[in-house]
Amino acid sequence: MAMETVQAVSSAYGTGQNGFAAIAGLGGEVPIARVLDGLFTFVWTLNPDGTLIAANRAPLDAAGIDADSVLGRPFWECPWWDHDLRVQEQLRDSVARAAAGETTRYDLVARLMGDSRTTLDFMLAPMNDQPGHISHLIASAIDISRRKTSEEALRLSEERFRAVVEVAPDGMAMVNRDGRIVLVNQGLERMFGHRREEMLGQPVEMLMPTRYHGMHLGLRSAYLQSPTTRDMAGRRELFALRRDGSEFPVEIGLNALQTADGMHVLATIVDVTKRKADQALLNKSLEEKTVLLNEVHHRVKNNLQVISSLLNLQSSTSTPEARVVLAESQSRVKAMALIHQLLYERNDFSRIELSVYVARLAGLLRETFLRQSARITLNVNNEALGLGIDLQRAVPCGLLVNELVTNAIKHAFPDDRPGRVDITLRRSSDGSGIIIVADDGIGLPADKELGKASSLGFQLIPLLVEQLGGEIGVSRDGGTVFTLLFHPEDRA
């Protein structure tokens, strides 16, 4: 301390009339008082009985007093200390001990200007002018209020940190660079079954199954080389070890903390035993529902096939006009059955992919209407890979394609006229789905309007478009082109 240096100098040069020594130099003696007045350190000189005989400017200015108001008074009765009887008694005792040759040092609170308070690091030491004779007492102090404030703030911060860690519902442990546990919370005690004192100071590997020990040493070293906030194992499953030797699944999050003692790692450990059990139960439930839905779609498909077969049997004993009607009905049934067939095959009950569905539907239509004739060709052009539609609107969409293609085959090519029907799938710029059914036949007569024609198919089309939540347009130039616009998935 600066005060100890002053004391040594004073002892070496003796004391002047003002209680401070003078330093011999060129041109005469320089009073130490002038030197001390330039310091922020508080310095006082006392007689062995505790009478104040000198003070530098720092304590006088800090208290807003002059030297005359305190010189000659007992040191403990001066304004710096008269705010607290306990402080005065402590100083009286220190003076007695210093007069007996003992140096004392401690923190105490002083009163300054405006009745403010500050904490001082205070020391009182005897000064000898010859062996065994104490001539003066030197008191010195430095203002440590800012340091005290910082220490208190740090203490409160540490207390808050420990309180947060302690009450956290998950297990938390802090590990130093050597891999030893330096802090645990009560959640960790409950989770592992160890008492706190059994874990502190121990290698963190005590909480792991033996098979992890060798690997963990390398992983820990690598993490400390480049510490980040992350989970410990990525997607790998981890297990921890309880005190009774049982293992349980955990997830571990790591946070690197720079402390006064170096880099530490705060590990948050979550017991996921219940979550794993719940996930397994959920997976089992989903699997059972999947099996059930598979069975439902399979049975619906089979029932529709039975209906199709009955229609086929009925047509064998019907008039030619009735056979045409029954064939159309059979085609509609097959279009619906195909949807359930695809859902059953693909094990995805949320959507069907239109490219696959339309290609399979075109095959059924060829078999039903074009099997005995090659004069009409039916083509599918897929320009929208991945275009899908949800189950709720898949049936009206399939029936629409079925009706448009069936009508083209039946009416666009009279008198054995050859031609072609094209089904094209596209996606618009905003992601909407487009299905185009075009033929190069004679064209749709001007008096034929959707919803108003006498045929069932033309009456069904507007209803199906409404169920689909789409729009349909017709072009009659150079054949007939139906353009169906709809929103894929569940955007309708």
Image (cartoon, helix red, strand yellow):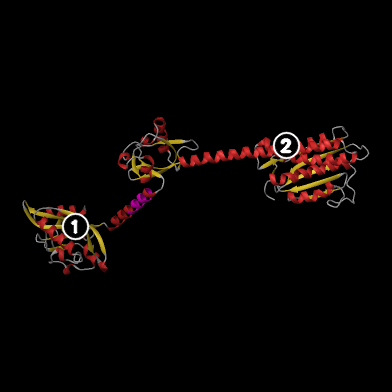
- The answer to which of 62 and 13 lies nearer the viewer is 62
Residue positioned 87% across, 39% down in the render: 323
- The secondary element bearing badge 1 is classed as strand
On residue 91, which mark appears? none
> Which amino acid, by three-letter code, is at mark 2?
Asn
| 27 left or right of 468 in image | left
- Say whether residue 28 is visible: no
Vertical order, 126 against 358 (above or below): below
Q: Within the image, what quadrant is residue 221 found in?
A: top left
Residue 351: percent from left, percent from top: 67, 42
**In the rendered structure, does residue 160 fall within the stretch colored magenta?**
yes
- Say whether residue 117 is visible: yes
- The secondary element bearing badge 2 is classed as helix
Magenta: main secondary structure equals helix
Residue 334: percent from left, percent from top: 77, 39
Answer whether labels 2 and 1 touch (C-beta < 8 Å).
no
Task: Answer with mark 2 or mark 1, whichever residue precedes in sequence.
Answer: 1
> Which amino acid, by three-letter code, is at mark 1?
Ser
Vertical order, 421 against 90 (above or below): above
**Residue bearing the label numbered 1:** 140
- Disc 1 crowd rating (10 Å Cα; few below 14, some 14-19, many 20+) is many
- Disc 2 crowd rating (10 Å Cα; few below 14, some 14-19, many 20+) is some
**Residue bearing the label numbered 2:** 302
Residue positioned 36% across, 51% down in the render: 163
Q: Magenta stretch: give its range.
A: 156-165
